[in-house]
Image (cartoon, helix red, strand yellow):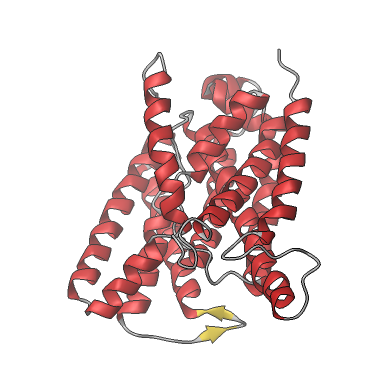
């Protein structure tokens, strides 16, 4: 059995180095000793953006880890249950009607996106309850159905929108950290805190779920309650990220799987590893997004998709057995 502590320590050091060095890079290199306008750019724009990227990546990674435990499938992602499509629909409706307002410093687009995400969560939960019980298969099918339905509504809204509104919708759906600041960082932290703490307390239950529901029940696990708590924690984190940053794909699928190869499948170690790796991965992707074609930027969701596509294929081909639902 591998010792998970050395990889965890290495991930912690890499995460610290990423948080320390990433703000220095952009259209121009700005050292910490900079003064004047360059110092304002470093402290007021780059540092909060890197912190937002780290927190968002950590949240997506933890959500992916919990969904992979819930479905016992390493291809499960934070967007499996339609949360991303719900958020995108909320943002699309807001943009289409040309609304513009803020509430407690939160933009109307973010509020609309989070509302859409929570509507998707409520619909998936409601459909699962109507069907009876809270089985994994029913939860998955309800999520896929809601996701496809909301995606079709987004296409309809894009079709009937003008050129400017349609472009804004597409741009938002690419996922970006361009507008990240300290205020958005503060908005993300409650979702991270509540979700991460809940998942840390459920590490034993997630370990047993990965082995099988029958074994978990025999060990005294309340399967129905645990599934609901995992579903709630992951959905809140995904909803918070998508509302503020847009849908950023593949982070939640790649990060937990890589961490599982590094520290093993025990969620006592996999949870902090996923937190660290997801955060540093998205922070590095965001650094690439603002340096590759500077002074222009590539949406960070495009970078993660370009990396995630080949990883998905490798993961699919490297598995000896078929994936389970």
Residue 201 visible in this rendered orientation of the protein:
no
Horizontally, is 19 left or right of 110 in the view?
Answer: right
- State the quadrant of the C terminus: top left
Residue 161 visible in this rendered orientation of the protein:
yes
Horizontally, is 172 left or right of 191 in the view?
Answer: left
State the residue in front, 258 or 209: 258
Residue 61, position as x, y percentages in the image? 57, 44
Horizontally, is 126 left or right of 17 in the view?
Answer: left
Q: Is residue 214 above or below residue 20?
A: above
Residue 324, position as x, y percentages in the image? 39, 24
Which quadrant of the view contains residue 43?
bottom right
Residue 126, position as x, y percentages in the image? 40, 53
The residue under the point 55% across, 25% down is 210
Q: Is residue 3 above or below residue 255?
A: above
State the residue in front, 12 or 34: 34
Q: Is residue 14 above or below residue 71?
A: below
The residue under the point 40% across, 67% down is 172
The residue under the point 64% across, 51% down is 195
């Amino acid at each position: 059995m591998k010792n998970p502590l050395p990889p965890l320590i290495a991930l912690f050091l890499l995460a610290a180095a990423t948080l320390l060095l990433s703000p220095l890079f952009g259209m121009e290199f700005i050292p910490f000793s900079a003064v004047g306008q360059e110092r304002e750019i470093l402290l007021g724009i780059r540092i909060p953006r890197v912190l937002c990227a780290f927190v968002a990546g950590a949240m997506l990674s933890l959500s992916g880890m919990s969904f992979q435990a819930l479905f016992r499938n390493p291809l499960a992602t934070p967007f499996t249950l339609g949360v991303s499509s719900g958020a995108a629909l909320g943002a699309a409706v807001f943009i289409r009607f040309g609304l513009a307002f803020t509430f407690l410093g939160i933009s109307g687009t973010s509020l609309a996106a989070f509302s859409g995400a929570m509507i998707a969560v409520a619909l998936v939960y409601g459909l699962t309850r109507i069907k009876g019980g809270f089985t994994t298969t029913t939860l998955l099918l309800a999520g896929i159905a809601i996701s496809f339905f909301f995606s079709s509504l987004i296409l309809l809204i894009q079709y009937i929108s003008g050129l400017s509104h349609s472009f804004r919708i597409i741009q938002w759906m690419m996922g970006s950290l361009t507008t990240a600041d300290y205020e958005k960082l503060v908005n993300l932290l409650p979702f991270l805190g509540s979700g991460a703490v809940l998942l840390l307390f459920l590490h034993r239950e997630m370990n047993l779920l990965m082995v099988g529901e029958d074994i978990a029940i025999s060990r005294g696990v309340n399967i129905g309650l645990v599934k609901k708590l995992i579903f709630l924690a992951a959905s809140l984190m995904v909803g918070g990220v998508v509302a503020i940053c847009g849908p950023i794909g593949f982070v939640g699928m790649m990060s937990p799987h890589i961490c599982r190869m590094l520290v093993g499948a025990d969620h006592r170690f996999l949870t902090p590893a996923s937190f660290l790796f997801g955060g540093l991965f998205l922070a590095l992707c965001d650094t690439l997004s603002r340096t590759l074609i500077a002074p222009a930027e590539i949406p960070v969701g495009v970078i993660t998709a370009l990396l995630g596509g080949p990883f998905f294929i490798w993961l699919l081909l490297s598995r000896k057995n078929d994936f389970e639902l």
